Amino acid sequence: MTISEELLPAWTALLHRCDAATDPEPYGRELLRRWSEPQRRYHTREHLSAVLRHVDDLAGHAADPDAVRLAAWFHDAVYRPDRSENEERSAALAVRALTAAGLPAARVAEVERLVLLTVTHDPAPGDRDGEVLCDADLAVLGGTPEAYAAYAAAVREEYGFVPEPDFRAGRAAVLRGLLALPALYRTPAARERFTDAAHANLTAELRRLEG
């Protein structure tokens, strides 16, 4: 079974649980098309699938797990490496699509808020939905050194148009920002599972970039 064959039924079931007033399958196919665009190397359907799996693992911590799942579907639905407003465009896309699907305005607003949180990955204390989404999105940082190296290489491919000195400076700034967060992971399960490996991976990459 392909990732798309796994993801499309999950999307359809999610929208039905959220009382969508329209057939969710056509828009699910549109989202999967977006997640398959040729400029993507890391932000692919595989990343979407991984984030959704982590959301499922952490769902017991969330106040509204299905809102978090919806946000996961949209959080990088608009992705152009040469632009800086991807999260804002993704949030706006979520509002348009979910409103058209007939979801309640309060849930649509929550999904929009969650998608925008992925700009900083710094949810406020007690923001349980934000904590789950951000931890799921950042779980890749806490993988094995080999998995992290593959992730870092894919990110570099997405920014292949950026000269190496500029990429090194920009990427180093991102890594320093992540390491400076008050806590990289906020849910107890993710904090225990990923923190040590993530700090080791980020620090090792930063040293390579600055070496």
Image (tube, helix red, strand yellow):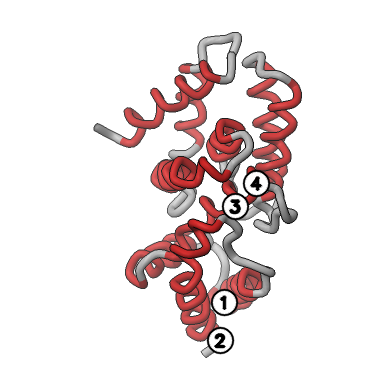
Image marks 1 and 3: residues in contact by CB distance under 8 Å: no
The circle drawn on residue 128 is 4
In this image, 5 relative to 115: left or right? left
Which residue position is annotated with label 2? Answer: 210
Cα distance in 3D space between marks 2 and 3: 27 Å
Mark 3 is surrounded, within 10 Å at the Cα level, by few (under 14), some (14 to 19) or many (20 or more) other residues, namely: many
Cα distance in 3D space between marks 2 and 4: 35 Å
Residue type for callout 4: Arg
The circle drawn on residue 134 is 3
Does residue 90 appear anywhere in the picture? Answer: yes
Q: 99 and 16: which one is in front? A: 16
**Tag 3's secondary structure?**
helix
Q: Quadrant of residue 183?
A: bottom right
Image marks 2 and 3: residues in contact by CB distance under 8 Å: no
Q: Earlier in the sequence, mark 4 or mark 1?
A: 4
Mark 4 is surrounded, within 10 Å at the Cα level, by few (under 14), some (14 to 19) or many (20 or more) other residues, namely: many
Does residue 156 appear anywhere in the picture? Answer: no
* Residue 171 rendering spot, x and y as whole percentages: 59, 71
Q: Please identify the residue farthest to the bottom as the structure is shown.
A: 211
Image marks 2 and 1: residues in contact by CB distance under 8 Å: yes
Q: Earlier in the sequence, mark 4 or mark 3?
A: 4
Q: Nearer the viewer, mark 1 or mark 3?
A: 3
Residue type for callout 2: Glu
